[in-house]
Amino acid sequence: MIGWLRTCNYWPKCATEKVKPLNTKHVDQFKRIIQRLEKVKELAGLDDKAFALLSEPQKVLEVNIPVKMDDGTMKIFKGYRAQFNDARGPFKGGIRFHPAVTYDEVKTLSAWMTFKTAAVNLPLGGSKGGVVVDPKELSDRELEALSRRYAQAIHKLIGPEVDVPAPDVATDPRIMAWMMDEYEKIVGRHQPGVITGKPLSIGGSAARSYSTAQGGAFVLDEAAKKIGLHKGATVAIEGFGNAGSHMALILQKMGYKITAVSDSRGTAVNCMGLDVQGLIEHKEQTGSVRNYVGGEKFVGSHCFEQDTDILIPAALENSITQENAEIIKAKLIVELANGPITPEADEILLQKGKMIVPDILANAGGVMVSYFEQVQNAYGYYWTEHEVLAKLEGGMRKSFEEIWAVKEKYQTDLRTAAYILATERIVQAMRDRGWI
């Protein structure tokens, strides 16, 4: 297997290896983060050395992964692991299996993870990994072989006190279990803390499967109070996968009214409130929320157009753009997806007086419970679901209030406030380590 590490002279602990040239496909996504840092620099006085250190990842590994397929042929898959910054603690970030994975995508997502963990004050850094593959095209045996070979390829860069992967797009507890098992075979001992998002039987944490949505619901509740929305407020959710469907169920139980849901194939609307469990069952049977019998004929073809109090983009990056931002009626937007709003759309929505709870806060519940899983693995002592949820609620609500206080101090929006607070925490750690 072949690997490259992107290195920077100003980083401590950097090895000297071949540098992989940048792919340009996702450059605009990374530029978005640099633009955020430039705004932090302008408002909060980020110094040039810190800015430089936060403008590039510490390491990016690229690997070629050979897998023997069921028909006897050998196929080579491209894989990556990006490690952005570990000043505050071990790197932390998911692994995705998707045909569109690129070098620049994992670099960008590792940066987002760095700011996310700092925004909610976890003692972790940020990383991200991925393999260029459509897992739906693999048999179970091929998928397991790929998962294990990827774990072999990156094993020198990961570990409970180094870098802790987790599930992401198209990966799940089963895949995490295979990777953990392969890592433990290599090191010759049990180390459940090397990976989070595992099955409960081998060191997973209670509530992990829905923690992203649950954390988002807690901060949504805090944001709603700030702008005078009460229980019974109407909610539209774009994206009805794991995070979106769990969010709908949780908010419905909290007293919010889910009136519109969309997926890639259609939209379901009921102004009196959708039966979320019935909608989940309908999607499991048909593959889409479209044509749900509990819905109604409606104006507009997308949940963005519906007249709701709250909008939750829970699908893909860049789903809200300059072209469709004007049609959004919701007062509060909570980014359960990563990067769902483009910078141009962000400006339009802020000018219209919308409150936006940014992704690095809104979807941090997943990494917070992953951190709880690491702690439980280290202790060998496991908490109940109730205990995990109580800690998650305390952490998420406190983080919202801390970011709100920064927003008020600098008279800015919540996204900029979250980046200011996260950056200050990362910079302080780098300064205390003597990196700057």
Image (cartoon, rainbow, N blue to C red):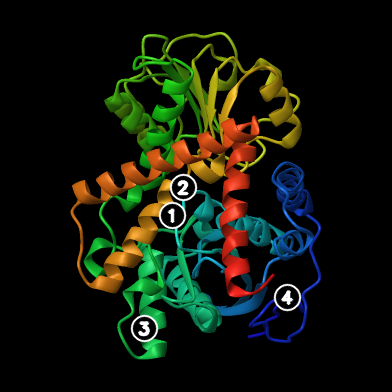
Q: Which residue is mark 4?
A: 6
Which element type, helix, strand or loop, lies under badge 2? Answer: loop
Q: Which residue is mark 3?
A: 184
> Who's the residue at 38% across and 30% down the image?
248
Which element type, helix, strand or loop, lies under badge 3? Answer: helix
> Looking at numbered disc 3 in the image, what kind of residue is underneath it?
Glu
Q: Nearer the viewer, mark 3 or mark 2?
A: 2
Q: Nearer the viewer, mark 3 or mark 1?
A: 1
Mark 2 and mark 1 in contact? Answer it, CB < 8 Å: yes
Which element type, helix, strand or loop, lies under badge 1? Answer: helix
Q: Position of residue 271 (x, y in %)?
A: 42, 9
- The circle drawn on residue 367 is 1
- 299 relative to 182, above or below: above
> Looking at numbered disc 2 in the image, what kind of residue is underneath it?
Ala
Return the disc, 3 or 2, that comes first in the chain's sequence. Answer: 3
Which element type, helix, strand or loop, lies under badge 4? Answer: loop
Q: CA distance from mark 2 to mark 4?
A: 27 Å
Mark 2 and mark 4 in contact? Answer it, CB < 8 Å: no
> Looking at numbered disc 1 in the image, what kind of residue is underneath it?
Val
Query: Dividing the image into 4 quarters, which one contains the C terminus?
Result: bottom right
- The circle drawn on residue 17 is none
> Who's the residue at 50% across and 38% down the image?
336
Q: CA distance from mark 3 to mark 2?
A: 28 Å
Residue 98 visible (yes or no): no
Q: Position of residue 76 (x, y in %)?
A: 63, 76
Q: Which residue is mark 2?
A: 364
